[in-house]
Amino acid sequence: MFPLIRYKILDTYEELGRTGAKIIAAQIAEKPNAVLGLATGSSPVSIYQSLIADYRAGKLDFSKITSVNLDEYVGLGGDHPQSYRYFMQKNLFDHVNIDPAKTFVPNGLAADMTAECAAYDERIVKLGGIDLQLLGIGLDGHIGFNEPADSFTEETHVVSLHPSTVEANARFFESADQVPRSAITLGIGSIMRARKILLIANGPAKKEILEKAISGPITPRLPASILRLHPDVTVLYTEE
Ligand code: F6R
């Protein structure tokens, strides 16, 4: 029914990393100055490790790449160890030859969040859009921090995090009270306008929501389900 979604099940998390990295490497080979939409969280770590290994082996060049991250916690600066800017530096940017001036993450400390959101969308338009968007999926079906809602929000915006998201992300903080309650996220519009989408998930806890996203109703109550209307989506899943 939705032939353009490619769904691949991998045996291990490491294999998911290698397979995802190959898709990103193919994008860089096709367009050395591609705009990559990147994600944080635990799912993409093995992809980033594989990309770093390929870079060190001389197989990848990030010098012309621009990256645009999906989201950032409101209230955390880039030097906060739980900020998504910090995550990206430690898990990818510090280890490859990407130009730091071409790595964009929303500013969680912006004094005017409305202006920050509008400027983020404008920047993506000026860059010519996202060539390949990497996405994880939340236990509630969120993509970026587009949480279940009554309607889809197109633009970059500030969201209140769903209690299940706060709980799921508490593992990265000393306690759940320290998890910021809001985040700035790319909207569904910029995600859907990306030319290619790579959605990844690992672990049995994600299986049910992933399958619902792929084969249940398309609804803002399960934000990832909108990806079925996108013409070029690859889903990688491993139970590990
Ligand atoms: C992260 C992001 C989130 C995560 C999702 C899955 O930048 O936008 O949507 O992708 O919460 O997180 P993990 O991979 O930690 O299970």
Image (cartoon, rainbow, N blue to C red):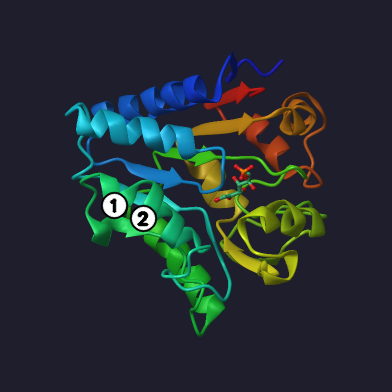
Q: Position of residue 158 (x, y in %)?
A: 63, 68
Q: Is residue 195 above or below residue 71?
A: above
Q: The residue under label 1 is which amino acid type? A: Asp
Is residue 31 among the parts visible in the rendering? no
Q: Would residue 25 be found to the left or right of residue 210 on screen?
A: left
Callout 1 secondary element = helix
Tags 2 and 1 touching, CB below 8 Å: yes
Q: Going 49% across and 70% down the picture, which residue do you hit?
A: 118
- Find residue 89 and name its label: 2
* Residue 124, quarter of the rendered image: bottom left
Callout 2 secondary element = helix
Q: Going 35% across and 50% down the picture, which residue do you hit?
A: 67
Q: Would residue 50 be found to the left or right of residue 224 on screen?
A: left
| Quarter of the image with the C terminus in it | top right
Q: Is residue 204 above or below residue 143?
A: above
- Find residue 94 and name its label: 1
Q: Going 72% across and 26% down the picture, which residue do you hit?
A: 214
Q: Position of residue 148 (x, y in %)?
A: 78, 51
Q: In the image shown, does 150 or 92 lie closer to the viewer? A: 92
| Quarter of the image with the N terminus in it | top right
